[in-house]
Image (spheres, helix red, strand yellow):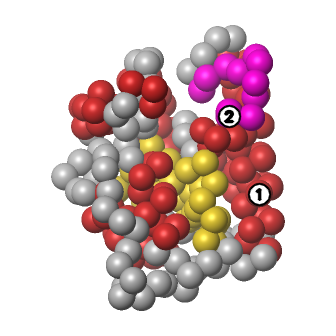
């Protein structure tokens, strides 16, 4: 997913809504590109990247689908908790935190909303088709490709998160179109109760 510049100098920036915005999806869904574009459209925003947070672990890192499963889950929750702590700090300073993170199930989302409390949380699932995600992943530079089968992750997200937040099928959209939709509609469509 390639993107044009975040905005032209003539485009007005939007005032950020209160709270935090979590954007999730499968590898290849466009989280990195779209969250950069979304954050660039607000006057005060901070983009927080779950992959960057994971890279803080130098030795002993276990991926979200890695083994042993209990350590994979522990590290996933550690990343999520640290992202939420940073998000709270940015929100307290008047910035909209835009969180780019794989949220595989309701348990992780519930933990994140608890850690973000009392901030209002907007939750967007970028949901292009699995085939679209695989194609986009294959088109990435080799060093940024995901080299595992994430169909199980897709099943878990579908089963556990169905009907939660706003599921945006971005299969036929450009990154700019997806970002514009998120900025325009997330406050109304993605709010968590």
Residue at the image position 37 percent from the left and 31 percent from the top: 141
Residue at the image position 70 percent from the left and 56 percent from the top: 113
Residue 15 horizontal/vertical position (percent): 55, 86
Q: CA distance from mark 2 to mark 1?
A: 14 Å
Total marks in image: 2
Residue at the image position 36 percent from the left and 66 percent from the top: 5
Give the left or right position of residue 15, taking residue 91 as reference.
Answer: left
Q: Which residue is mark 2?
A: 54
Residue 143 horizontal/vertical position (percent): 45, 26
Q: Residue furthest top?
A: 68
Tell me if residue 153 comes above or below residue 174 in the rendering. Answer: above
82 and 39: which one is in front? 39
Residue 136 horizontal/vertical position (percent): 29, 36
Quadrant in the rendering for residue 59 = top right
Tell me if residue 7 comes above or below residue 117 in the rendering. Answer: below
Q: Residue furthest front?
A: 9
Could you tell me which quadrant the C terminus lies in? bottom right
One can see residue 186 in this view: no
Look at the numbered disc 1 and give the secondary structure of its residue: helix
Q: Which mark is residue 106?
A: none
Give the left or right position of residue 49, taking residue 74 as reference.
Answer: left
Tell me if residue 109 comes above or below residue 27 in the rendering. Answer: below
45 and 181: which one is in front? 45
Q: Is residue 108 magenta?
A: no
Q: Which residue is mark 1?
A: 86
Residue 18 horizontal/vertical position (percent): 64, 78
The magenta stretch is 54-64
């Amino acid at each position: 997913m390639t993107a044009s510049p975040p905005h032209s100098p003539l485009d007005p920036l939007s005032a950020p809504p209160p709270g935090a915005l979590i954007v999730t999806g499968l590898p290849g869904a466009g989280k990195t590109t779209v969250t950069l574009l979304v954050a660039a459209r607000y006057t005060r925003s901070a983009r927080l990247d779950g992959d960057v947070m994971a890279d803080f672990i130098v030795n002993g890192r276990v991926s979200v689908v890695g083994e042993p499963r209990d350590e994979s889950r522990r590290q996933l929750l550690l990343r999520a908790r640290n992202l939420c702590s940073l998000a709270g700090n940015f929100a307290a300073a008047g910035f909209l935190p835009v969180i780019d993170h794989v949220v595989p199930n309701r348990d992780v989302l519930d933990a994140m909303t608890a850690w973000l409390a009392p901030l209002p949380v907007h939750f967007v699932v970028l949901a292009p088709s699995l085939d679209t995600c695989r194609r986009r992943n294959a088109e990435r530079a080799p060093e940024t490709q995901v080299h595992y089968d994430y169909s199980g992750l897709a099943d878990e997200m579908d089963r556990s998160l169905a009907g939660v937040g706003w599921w945006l099928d971005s299969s036929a959209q450009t990154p700019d179109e997806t970002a514009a939709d998120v900025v325009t509609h997330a406050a109304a469509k993605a709010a968590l109760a």
